[in-house]
């Protein structure tokens, strides 16, 4: 089994910053793509950013230039630095990881979600 535990959400004023972290643990052989998604009330879950095992990144247009995704492979952890936050960034943020387990299966895992609320 693999677990993803998120931390770092909270309430911030518009223009402020937050940093989310997501640590993976368990029967991990390797982690391929890691990413962050978000879901606002009444809306679908959308990709925010992802990072591949060799560090290639991709961002949603709405967060380009404001958010930065990074990872620490030694710690099996992915981060999302969010700057210049806007009220429309308010959502539950979920981390995601494509994990190859020690049992040689590749499975996608989700974190429990972290609430980010940006006040105007």
Image (tube, rainbow, N blue to C red):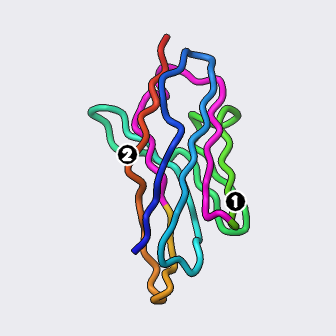
Residue beneath disc 2: 45
Identify the element where label 2 is drawn: loop
* 72 sits left or right of 19 in the view: right
**What residue do we see at 48% from left, 48% from top?**
6
- In this view, 91 is above or below 73: above
- In this view, 39 is above or below 103: above
* Residue nearest the viewer, comparing 48 with 18: 18
Residue beneath disc 1: 72
**Residue 91: percent from the left, percent from the top?**
41, 33
Identify the element where label 1 is drawn: strand
Q: Distance between the Cα atoms at labels 2 and 1?
A: 25 Å
Asked which quadrant contains residue 40, the reply is top left
**Residue 119: percent from the left, percent from the top?**
47, 15
Q: Where are the magenta residues, as a range?
A: 75-96
- In this view, 98 is above or below 23: below
**What residue do we see at 62% from left, 34% from top?**
82
**What residue do we see at 27% from left, 33% from top?**
42
* Residue nearest the viewer, comparing 37 with 77: 77
* Residue nearest the viewer, comparing 105 with 9: 9
Q: Earlier in the sequence, mark 2 or mark 1?
A: 2
Q: Is residue 87 magenta?
A: yes
Q: Quadrant of the N terminus?
A: bottom left
Q: Which mark is residue 117?
A: none
**Residue 101: percent from the left, percent from the top?**
49, 81
**What residue do we see at 40% from left, 45% from top?**
113
**Residue 13: percent from the left, percent from the top?**
55, 15
Asked which quadrant contains residue 64, the reply is top right
């Amino acid at each position: 089994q693999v677990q993803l535990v998120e931390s770092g959400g909270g309430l911030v004023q518009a223009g402020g910053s937050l940093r989310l972290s997501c640590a993976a643990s368990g029967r991990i052989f390797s982690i391929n793509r890691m990413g962050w998604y978000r879901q606002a009330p009444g809306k679908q879950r959308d990709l925010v950013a992802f990072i591949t095992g060799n560090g290639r990144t991709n961002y949603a247009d709405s967060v380009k230039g404001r958010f930065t995704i990074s990872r620490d492979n030694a710690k099996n952890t992915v981060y999302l630095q969010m700057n210049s936050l806007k009220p429309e960034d308010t959502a539950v943020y979920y981390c995601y990881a494509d994990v190859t387990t020690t049992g040689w299966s590749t499975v996608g895992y989700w974190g429990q979600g972290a609430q980010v609320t940006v006040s105007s």
